[in-house]
Amino acid sequence: MGEALTRNETEVLALLRGANGPMTAYQLLGRMQRDGGAVAPPTVSGALKGLEEAGVVQRIATLRAWAAVTSPAPGVVAICDDCGTVRSVEAPSLFESLHQRLAAEGFAEARQTIEVHGRCGDCAGDKA
Ligand SMILES: [Zn+2]
């Protein structure tokens, strides 16, 4: 963080922050098409890479999509399979215990993402 974002990164981040849920690179590419013509795919993938390194977006592997990071602390990514919303749920004790277990195995973590699929409070409420 703290480094200035490029114009493409700023645009991709704004799209992800304005979206109701995660977006695929393909969807982002579609939204970035301008009057002058299409934006090249590497423009989007490069911007996503830079934003991921800056810690402001994260890849949702099970959806093959990207979402803006909503919490600075590592969290469990809770994905609603009904409405598609994604939120980060802070779980510091879970990550601390995971870290300790991995360290005991001599495993050096680079990054970790825990994705949980289910139904958000709104959608679960509708079904009740
Ligand atoms: Zn939902």
Image (cartoon, helix red, strand yellow):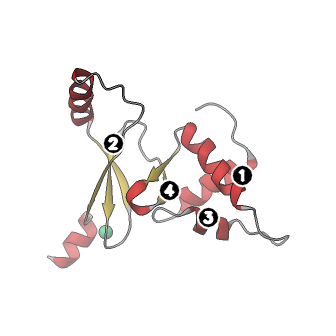
Residue occupying the far front of the picture: 106
| Lower position in the chain sequence, tag 1 or tag 2 | 1
The residue under label 2 is 75
Q: Quadrant of ligand 1?
A: bottom left
The local secondary structure at tag 1 comes to helix
Label 3 crowding class (10 Å Cα cut-off): few <14, some 14-19, many 20+?
many
Amino acid at the residue labelled 1: Asn
**Marks 4 and 1: in contact by CB < 8 Å?**
no
| Lower position in the chain sequence, tag 4 or tag 2 | 4
The local secondary structure at tag 3 comes to helix
The residue under label 1 is 8
User: Label 3 to label 4, Cα distance in Å?
Assistant: 9 Å
Label annotation for residue 66: 4
Label 1 crowding class (10 Å Cα cut-off): few <14, some 14-19, many 20+?
some
Where is residue 71 shown, x and y percent of the image? 41, 42
| Lower position in the chain sequence, tag 2 or tag 3 | 3
Which one is in front in this view, the residue at disc 4 or the one at disc 2?
A: 4
User: Label 1 to label 3, Cα distance in Å?
Assistant: 11 Å
User: Label 4 to label 2, Cα distance in Å?
Assistant: 15 Å
